[in-house]
Image (tube, helix red, strand yellow):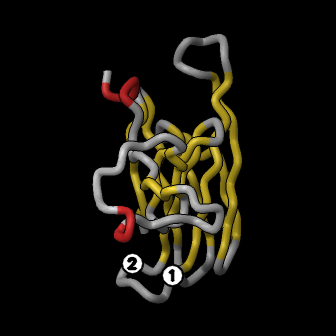
C-alpha cells in the first residue's frame, strides 16, 4: 500500500508498506532504493546525486506505526537533515526570534522554552 508520495523539484519519492508482511519499500523516481522488513519502526537511508549534478543529497525515510489514528503507518522524509514530510507530527523546527502571532499563554513550547513551529512540508526552491 502506498503510504506517501512527494515531489521535490524534478524528483519523486514514494513510500510503500505492507502491514501484513512488514516489508517497507522506498522508490526514488520509480527506482527502488531501499527495501527492509520491519514491524513498528523502520529507517531507510540513501543518497542520490543532486539536481545540479555535482553535490549529493542524503535522504532518510522513517516508517512509524501509530495505532491512535486512522492511518496506522506514517512516514517522515528528511533531505540533508531537514524534514520535508512530517506525517507523525513529531519533527518541529525551532524559531529563536519568532514574532509572537498568538498570546504567550497559548503558545506551545518545548522543554527548553523555545517555541515549537511545525516544519514546512516543502521549501521555496522546490516550487520552481
The reply to whether discs 2 and 1 touch (Cβ–Cβ < 8 Å) is yes
Q: Position of residue 106 (x, y in %)?
A: 35, 69
Front residue of this view, candidates 109 and 67: 109
Please say if 80 is above or below 119. Answer: above
Farthest residue, direction bottom: 68
Which element carries disc 2, helix, strand or loop? loop
Determine the residue positioned at 40% across, 23% down.
Answer: 125
Q: Position of residue 92 (x, y in %)?
A: 52, 56
The residue identified by callout 2 is 71
Determine the residue positioned at 66% across, 51% down.
Answer: 34
Please say if 58 is above or below 64. Answer: above
Please say if 84 is above or below 87. Answer: above
| Drawn side of residue 60 relative to residue 17, left or right | right
Q: Residues within 10 Å of mark 2 (few under 14, many from 20)?
A: few
Mark on residue 66? Answer: 1
Q: Position of residue 88 (x, y in %)?
A: 48, 68
Q: Total number of numbered labels? A: 2
Q: Residues within 10 Å of mark 1 (few under 14, many from 20)?
A: some
- The answer to which image quadrant residue 64 occupies is bottom right
- The answer to which image quadrant residue 22 occupies is bottom right
Q: Quadrant of the N terminus?
A: bottom left
Front residue of this view, candidates 64 and 3: 64
Please say if 14 is above or below 123. Answer: below
Mark on residue 84? Answer: none
Q: Quadrant of the C terminus?
A: top left
Mark nearer the N terminus (2 vs 1): 1
Q: Position of residue 28 (x, y in %)?
A: 53, 40
Front residue of this view, candidates 85 and 28: 85
Which element carries disc 1, helix, strand or loop? loop
- The answer to which image quadrant residue 72 occupies is bottom left
Q: What is the distance, in whole Å, between disc 2 and disc 1 at their CAs?
A: 7 Å
Front residue of this view, candidates 78 and 17: 78
Amino acid at each position: 500500500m502506498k503510504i506517501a508520495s512527494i515531489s521535490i523539484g524534478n524528483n519523486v519519492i514514494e513510500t510503500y508498506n505492507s502491514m501484513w508482511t512488514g516489508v517497507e519499500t522506498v522508490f526514488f523516481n520509480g527506482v527502488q532504493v531501499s527495501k527492509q522488513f520491519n514491524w513498528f519502526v523502520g529507517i531507510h537511508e540513501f543518497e542520490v546525486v543532486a539536481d545540479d549534478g555535482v553535490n549529493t543529497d542524503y535522504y532518510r525515510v522513517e516508517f512509524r506505526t501509530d495505532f491512535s489514528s486512522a492511518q496506522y503507518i506514517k512516514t517522515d522524509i528528511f533531505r540533508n537533515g531537514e524534514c520535508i514530510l512530517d506525517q507523525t507530527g513529531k519533527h518541529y523546527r525551532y524559531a529563536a526570534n519568532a514574532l509572537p502571532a498568538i498570546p504567550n499563554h497559548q503558545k506551545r513550547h518545548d522543554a527548553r522554552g523555545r517555541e515549537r513551529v511545525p516544519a514546512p512540508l516543502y521549501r521555496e526552491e522546490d516550487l520552481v
